[in-house]
Amino acid sequence: MSVHAPVAAAVRATNIVFACCGFLLASWVARIPQLRDHLNLDSTQLGWVLLGAAAGALVSRPLSGVIVVRLGQRRTVAVTGVLAAIGLVVVGAGDFTKPAVLVAGLLIIGFAGAAWDVAMNVQGTEVERALGRSIMPRFHAAFAAGTVVAAAIGAAMVALRVPVVLHLAVVALVVAVAVPLASRDYLPDERHVTKGGSGAVRAWREPRTLLIGLYVLAFAFGEGAANDWIAVALIDGHGAAEVVGALGFAVFLAAVTLVRWFGAGLLDRYGRVTVLRALGVITIVGLLLFIFGPNLPVALFGALLWGVGTAFGYPVGMSAGADDPRYAAARVAVISTVGKMAAFTGPPLIGWIGDHASVLRALLLVVALQGVALLIAGATRK
């Protein structure tokens, strides 16, 4: 076996694990309108139900760095991938039972997904260092590709009237098999990663780490708002049919995927800060078109630009946090914890504003956060 073969295998494995994560998460997100209708939820109630996944993540994410160091990236990903698949089955069961079951499934997905997210991102940074060039956006493109496939399948399931529980059960089976198999080709964990809890405590006191976390929060809020509310906003705000709402979600995800896959070289050529600020402006323009667009085509074009601008926020934040491999797991855990607070506050806040104004007007919160992100993008500099 050549020297480069293990790295090539790790690239494939990391792509598969990222893709499976996106596939699992977007599969249930694509069925949110049906879950809402079947359970008779209004916007506020839906917002609180969606909080389930964020609450599960909030419990486990602060400990994710320690979990990854203790169990190792390979084992963490394998175990949490299977656990998240179990949660997806529970979500499907919630469609024909009651909201409490749906929330329970989302709690499991959120709890497992937090450690899965940290472990696969730390592995991604190790592969990036082994290659000597920017590749993290491509791994997140694989995640986005998984979401695009999931959204397209979700649209087909809606059109064919396939029950939510059957759809999600098949997705869960695919993920539970693929993730443990793929993770066997991971690169070994860095030997000098900080051990124990002291590294995690230290990371929480670092201004740069916290600023990167805030930056990621702004983009996670924008990406999460798109995941949770694009379909609903198109249906309720722009009068789109259900299938068009699902396809609008797919347009956003496709834009994210293409920029992450083909745009990674921009980071090496122009630097993180310049690229991130340019994409931040594109995000704001896209959001304004989506919110205030006079017709459905303009709104869909806004969703496209929204996806283009959002593409690099999360992956580049992960890379910036892992610039020093000694503290990569601890810092990535802190940054992702701060970033995922957006998932905890976003759904209920947008849902509450949506009931009092409209979901479209509630998305102005995302515009405001993008303005903050433009001001602090310099924290991601190497």
Image (cartoon, grey):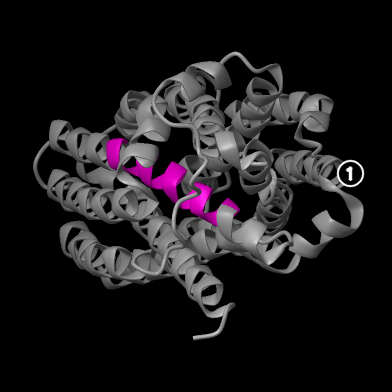
Q: Amino acid at mark 1?
A: Thr
**Residue 112 on the magenta span:** yes
- Is 261 displayed left or right of 332 in the figure? right
**Residue 194 on the magenta span:** no
- The mark tally for this picture is 1
Q: Is residue 256 visible?
A: no
* SS at badge 1: helix
- Residue 166 placement: quadrant: bottom left
38 or 2, nearer to the observer: 2
- How busy is the neighbourhood of tag 1: few (under 14 within 10 Å), some, or many (20 plus)? some
| Residue 362 vertical position relative to residue 250 in the rendered view, above or below | above
User: Considering the image in quadrants, where does the C terminus appear?
Assistant: top right
- Residue 126 placement: quadrant: bottom right
Q: Residue furthest top?
A: 205
| Residue 26 vertical position relative to residue 338 in the rendered view, above or below | below
The residue located at (20%, 66%) in the rendering is 173
| Residue 203 vertical position relative to residue 17 in the rendered view, above or below | above
Q: Which residue is mark 1?
A: 274
133 or 275, nearer to the observer: 133
Q: Which residues are magenta?
A: 111-125
